[in-house]
Image: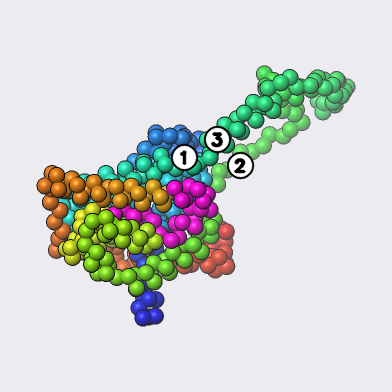
Amino acid sequence: MVVNMLINIWLVFLDTAFWLLIGLLAAGFIKSFISEGTMQRWVGGHGLGAILRAALFGAPLPLCSCGVLPAAIGLRRAGASKEATVSFLISTPETSIDSVAVTYALMGPVMAIFRPVAALVNAVGTGLLTTLVADEKIAEEKSLAATEETGCCASKQPETEAVVSSCCASEPKTVVNKTSCCSEKAPEPSCCSEAKADVPSQNKVMQVLSYAGAELLDDISKWLAFGIVLAGIMLTFIPPDWLAQWGGGLTAMLVMLVVGVPMYICAVASTPVAAGLLLAGVSPGAVLVFLLVGPATNIASFALLKQELGLKVTGMYLFGLSVLSLAMGLLLEWLLEVQNWQIEASLGHAHAMLPAAVSWGSAFILIFLAIKPLRRALVPQLG
């Protein structure tokens, strides 16, 4: 059993390694190439607009629940609001272009259409719920009020006289020193200053690699390792066949919710598992709940979300995702009954997986980067 567990942990790591690298590089790209002002215009606002843009921005990206974490953290640190970050965190791993294609191949057009629609509803709905507990807007208003009260433009600033000696003049002269930042003229440069040569900009590619492979990875590596180990343990002791015995209805959905929330599984990798559950007799609504919460959450994400977004937002993230996933599962069951839609699972189609060399190579790159002394010794530029 121990050997089985170790093998499963390694398999989970292999399954996540490539997508983790993609997520880290995406975060590095966001940090280095997208200015804070641009990010604020995209997803930095509050309300439905920012939430919807974040959901649509993340939906087609091929990132899983582990891979989306560094990308979302990079998004947040670049200026995205909390509700937009939550929306991105849900829509990105729940659906992607490749997962929709695999869903169509294995479960037909109904599930292939309903799955991404449910993911967007989850993302936008949970993002809106997050606004109830996110205190950013209140904090910004308080900060703005404080600025208006104490800002340099709010009241007249005292004028002081000072005797200064100009390096370009032989005699000192008295000048009026206006301390207000609202003065029309900007301070003139000293006539004694020497012309400075333009400093060449730092290599952007190295900025991306340094942030992704050192700074951000150091921040999240411990919790990611914890989540991967726990996912391997769960895979050992809770096999997918065990889930099939619960059949359909709200009880089955609740079981899928309890099992899927802490589990790590990619949107693409969860699709053949879901097809197998359908063939084993689990209802489509319960399978949909598994497809929504399984890729969107894992143990590692909770600790990192608490660190980046706070406990209240993390709690609302889990609550909103759970309630809306159950609601979408029940809605699918109702639509199937009313509209006489059919969902037929088939595992006869080949499932495109990453080449073994890519998975193993990604795993060893991550291990190398995570060992800080080794990384600094061999690639000191990364830090």
Which residue sits at x=53%, y=40%?
A: 135
Task: Tell me the residue that label 2 is attached to.
Answer: 199
Query: Type of residue at label 2?
Result: Val
Which residue sits at x=49%, y=57%?
A: 303
Q: Nearer the viewer, residue 208 or 36?
A: 36
**With respect to residue 281, does 127 lie above or below?**
above
Which residue sits at x=37%, y=62%?
A: 263
Mark 1 and mark 2 lie on one chain; the one further toward the N terminus is 1
Q: Quadrant of the C terminus?
A: bottom right
Looking at the rendered structure, the secondary structure element under dot 3 is helix
Query: Type of residue at label 3?
Result: Ile
Task: Tell me the residue that label 3 is attached to.
Answer: 138
**With respect to residue 267, does 51 lie above or below?**
above
Residue contact between numbered discs 2 and 3, judged by CB atoms under 8 Å: no
Looking at the rendered structure, the secondary structure element under dot 2 is loop
Q: Position of residue 178 (x, y in %)?
A: 76, 22
Q: CA distance from mark 3 to mark 1?
A: 11 Å
Looking at the rendered structure, the secondary structure element under dot 1 is loop
Which numbered dot is residue 89? none
Question: What are the residue bounds of the magenta stretch?
Answer: 289-316
- Magenta segment's dominant SS is helix
Q: CA distance from mark 2 to mark 3?
A: 40 Å
Which numbered dot is residue 132? 1
